[in-house]
Amino acid sequence: MLHGDDADADRELIERIRQGDTDAFGALVSRYLERASAVAFRIVHHREDAEDLVQDAFLAALRHMDDFDASRPFWPWLSRIIVNRGLDVTASRQARLTDNLEQDVLDLSADSAAELERKDLREQFRRALMDLPPRRRLVIELFEVEGLSIAEIAAALDAAPATVRWHLHAARRQLRGALERFHGDFR
Amino acid sequence: MKQIHADATPDPRMAEAIRAATGARHPSDADMAALHGRIVGAARPYLGVRLSMRTSWLDYAAAWSRTIVPVGLATAVVAASCLVWLSSSARRQTQNTVEHVAMLGAATNAVSSGDLVDLAISDVDAPAAPPKVPR
């Protein structure tokens, strides 16, 4: 969560960006690049695609900077742009997403049977994860892996906190079997 | 409902499984710096347009001020001249009116000779006395 000073600093940067100040835009990007990249990666699961998404989101924010209410915090607005654009991208590139994961995560050239079995369990968990509706999957990934709070996720998804809690609960329930198999093999 | 609220605590086992299944992001400082440079570089044209819009607006205002200030001064001078001219014209008009009244009084024999002289030399700023009408 942002403190008051951060919000004030954002407001000042945004005013300067509206005047065309490149240094101010660079400073704003520096403040949120790490968080934006983390969220983007959780949506597209591919480094280069995540970088493209982050760039696209920052540029969209810049183009619509005059519409932004500078009295409000910047990060929820930016995260909403990332999520909306990211979900659109994943919807149109579903096949590529699967290919990316298979390239990045699965290496079926393992030689031992135990290794193969472990990869199989990981693949089962991955399938279960990918079978979740996109917004539900994003909720559980942002909460469990990136450590975002329920309120932050709600702001990013433009949803009520209760809805986010429901998605989290439902995702955990849907993944429970695959998770138990996954950890049963590893421990 | 109680179970849903209890869910709001991160589960490290779930995080580990998700990381294993989806891969983890390990960007180096150099990667982040490169991405930062890419984003700012791509933003330069937009920021340049904003800067030029602001500059051109100021130029526009400055150019107009160079025209409007002399025109305003000239208008003020003309207006002042008009006021002076109108004022003197009104004084002449008042004087003419007094003379006309005196002449009318003399022609119609409605004013005595003493009053006629008073009327003719009376202060033009003073309201003209109405001619005495004989009963």
Image: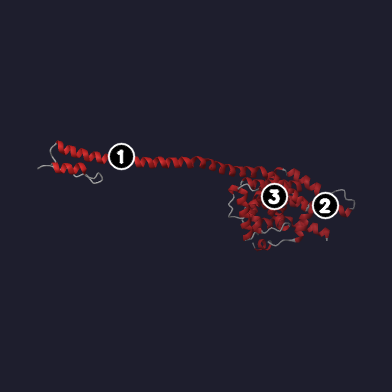
Which of pointers 2 and 3 lies earlier in the amino acid sequence?
2
The residue closer to the viewer here, B41 or A139, is B41
Q: Residues within 10 Å of mark 3 (few under 14, many from 20)?
A: some
Q: Residue at x 80, y 57 (%)?
A: A182
- Is residue B130 something one can see in this rendering? no
Q: To which residue does mark 1 refer?
A: B89
Q: Are marks 2 and 3 on the same chain?
A: yes
Residue A134: numbered disc: 3
Of all chains, the one bearing label 3 is A
Q: To which residue does mark 2 refer?
A: A120
For label 1, the SS is helix
Q: Residues within 10 Å of mark 1 (few under 14, many from 20)?
A: few
Question: Amino acid type of disc 1?
Answer: Ser
Q: Nearer the viewer, mark 2 or mark 3?
A: 3
The residue closer to the viewer here, B134 or B48, is B134
> Quick check: A142 left or right of A107?
left
